[in-house]
Amino acid sequence: MREIVLDTETTGISPAEGHRVIEIGALEMINHTPTGVQLHLYINPEREIEEGAFRVHGISTEFLADKPLFADIADEFLAFVGEDKMVIHNASFDVGFLNAELERLGKPVFPMSQAIDTLAMARKKFPGAQANLNALCKRFEIDNSHRDLHGALVDADLLAEVYIELIGGRQPGLSLDPASPSKKSADNDPASVDVGGFNITSDKTLAVRPHSASDEEKAAHEQFLQSIDNPIWKRS
């Protein structure tokens, strides 16, 4: 399963007001594991950057003056994403900006169904709690000390770690819940076991493994026992 963790930086907050994408950071995950394959692009927006946006990401109009236009990188970006799911924090913002850029070029836009919104996931999992990227990094003890300013690739990298935690950590098919009478027990659920007051439930049931020793294994074991000098179990 391939997913693309993605973040953008922009000249302002609204594509409807003519604001543009100026940075794209995207990294590839296969089966929820980063592969190291990534795409990082700076883009000349052909307009000034708002002061408020500059304070967030620190990217200046002067820095972007010699960078390619979105039209120059669109095909490379679309080929990188393909038809795979995009993991985005506050997906409506980034997808809205990307689709505005694609519409200018007469290219097909992304359906919202192609995006996995980690902001919505966090709000559902932790209702009432802060759900911005810094707060989630703190909750999951993810080191974000290098995040002085917003940056698309830095934020995509942090978001990949946050996303893994939101779906249940490195073993999303395994859940730990306090055992209670309302939970399935090992008696009626072969994939559910009580351990130390927690109900461990796996979404995979393994086939029963044979544990009986063969006649050859029993004979070898007996021969080994006879070879032990003065074993403790024979002492009076």
Image: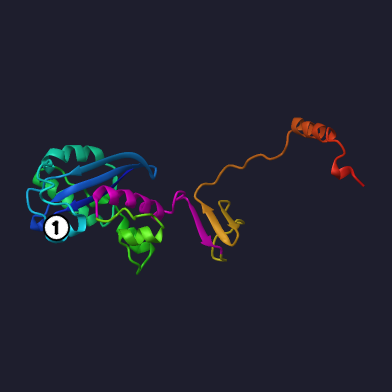
Q: Nearer the viewer, residue 236 or 119?
A: 236
Q: Please provide the residue range marked out in magenta.
A: 150-179
Q: Nearer the viewer, residue 25 or 196?
A: 25
Q: Judge left or right: residue 43 versus residue 122.
A: left
Q: Judge left or right: residue 15 versus residue 149.
A: left
Question: Quadrant of the image for the N terminus?
Answer: top left
**Mark 1 belongs to which amino acid?**
Gly
Quadrant hosting residue 79: top left
Extreme residue in the left direction: 47
Q: Residue at x 27, y 45 (%)?
A: 26
Q: Residues within 10 Å of mark 1 (few under 14, many from 20)?
A: some
| Image position, residue 220 (x, y; %) | 78, 31
Asked if residue 82 can be seen in this view, the reply is no
Circle 1 is placed at which residue position? Answer: 12
| Image position, residue 141 (x, y; %) | 41, 57
Extreme residue in the right direction: 236
| Image position, residue 46 (x, y; %) | 7, 48
Quick check: is 219 in the magenta stretch? no
Q: Judge left or right: residue 133 versus residue 236.
A: left
Q: Residue at x 51, y 61 (%)?
A: 177
So how many labels did they put on this image?
1
Quick check: is 165 in the magenta stretch? yes
Asked if residue 148 can be seen in this view, the reply is yes
| Image position, residue 180 (x, y; %) | 56, 65
Quadrant hosting residue 233: top right
Query: In this rendering, is residue 202 above or below 83?
Result: below
The kind of secondary structure element at disc 1 is loop
Q: Judge left or right: residue 162 versus residue 48.
A: right
Here the colouring is rainbow
